[in-house]
Image (cartoon, helix red, strand yellow):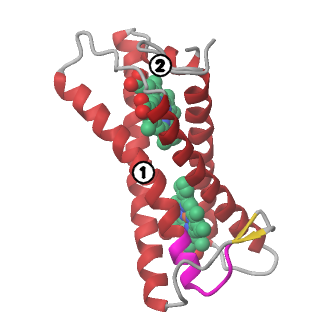
Amino acid sequence: MGARNTARDFGWVTRLIHWLTALGVILMLALGTYIASIRPSLGNLWLFGLHKSLGLSLFALTLARLSWHLLSPPPAPLSEGVPRWQVTAARAVHWMLYALLLAIPLSGWIASAATGIDVVLFGRLTLPPIVPPSETLDRLFFGVHGVLTSLLAVLILLHAGAAVHHHLLRRDRTLRRMIEG
Ligand code: HEM
Ligand code: HEM
């Protein structure tokens, strides 16, 4: 079981990052929705900290994933008998997922910095404020964060639905090669 991707298969590095990201993103959508619905208080501040720390970890993981793909390009899609529009749609969704995995944490970081409160990674590392305190930026970027996360949720449903479609109806190795390699 190789670490690198080959012309036909995903290596374990890509598969591990894919499923860690999937788990992390689903947790973060739930946690984000929860913290947006409560009143911040001393007792629940750690949940906000956890959301920010995990979100920025996912940002770093996505940068690592994209760098890894430059060194070890992913295999071409299993497109035999698949209509062209579906191959194009899959590629477009993958790129949008990558773009959102970068833009969502960035918008969260900008919005959080704009509140004037330090963003602290796992209670240890204080990040530089990337923007000065500003109510306009705070409102604008939390708005952007909310819209982009809704878009992400829709794309994930499409993406996971397409994977299950390949597995159950087309009966090809698309899902299996992302699990077993
Ligand atoms: C929840 C968040 C998820 C994100 C952000 C995500 C993201 C991605 C991305 C960006 C790729 C493209 C990999 C490449 O560059 O080649 C990919 C591939 C893939 N994903 Fe996901 N994914 C998620 C969840 C899932 C789930 C739940 C499933 C299965 C039910 C799934 C199944 C697959 C499969 C089978 C591929 C390989 C497609 C191919 O062979 O071209 N993903 N995913
Ligand atoms: C992949 C990463 C992330 C995902 C999937 C995500 C998801 C979400 C979601 C779904 C919400 C609720 C939005 C709403 O209902 O309006 C939310 C809120 C929030 N996010 Fe994120 N987030 C991520 C990263 C970050 C980062 C990196 C930060 C800050 C450094 C951050 C800070 C916040 C804050 C402070 C809220 C609460 C906003 C409020 O009180 O209305 N998020 N997030």
Q: On screen, 148 above or below 40?
A: above
Residue 141: give x, y in percent of width and height: 44, 75
| Horizontal side of residue 117 vs 94, given as left or right | right
Disc tally is: 2
User: Where is the N terminus found, in terms of image quarters?
Assistant: top right
Residue 57: give x, y in percent of width and height: 64, 53
Identify the residue at the far front of this view: 71
- Image point (39%, 64%), residue name: 147
Can residue 33 be seen here? The reply is: no
| Residue identifier under label 1 | 152
Q: Give the mark, 1 or 2, whose residue is nearer the N terminus.
A: 1
| Residue identifier under label 2 | 175
Look at the image and say whether residue 113 sits in the magenta stretch.
Answer: yes
Residues packed near mark 1 inside 10 Å, few (<14), some (14 to 19) or many (20 plus): many
Which amino acid, by three-letter code, is at mark 2? Leu
Task: Determine if the C-beta at disc 1 is less than 8 A from ligand 2.
Answer: yes
Which amino acid, by three-letter code, is at mark 1? Leu
Residue 117: give x, y in percent of width and height: 66, 83
The magenta stretch is 109-119
Q: Nearer the viewer, residue 122 or 146?
A: 122
- Image point (66%, 79%), residue name: 39
Look at the image and say whether residue 41 sits in the magenta stretch.
Answer: no
Can residue 122 be seen here? The reply is: yes
Q: Tell me the SS state at disc 1.
A: helix
Q: Tell me the SS state at disc 2.
A: helix
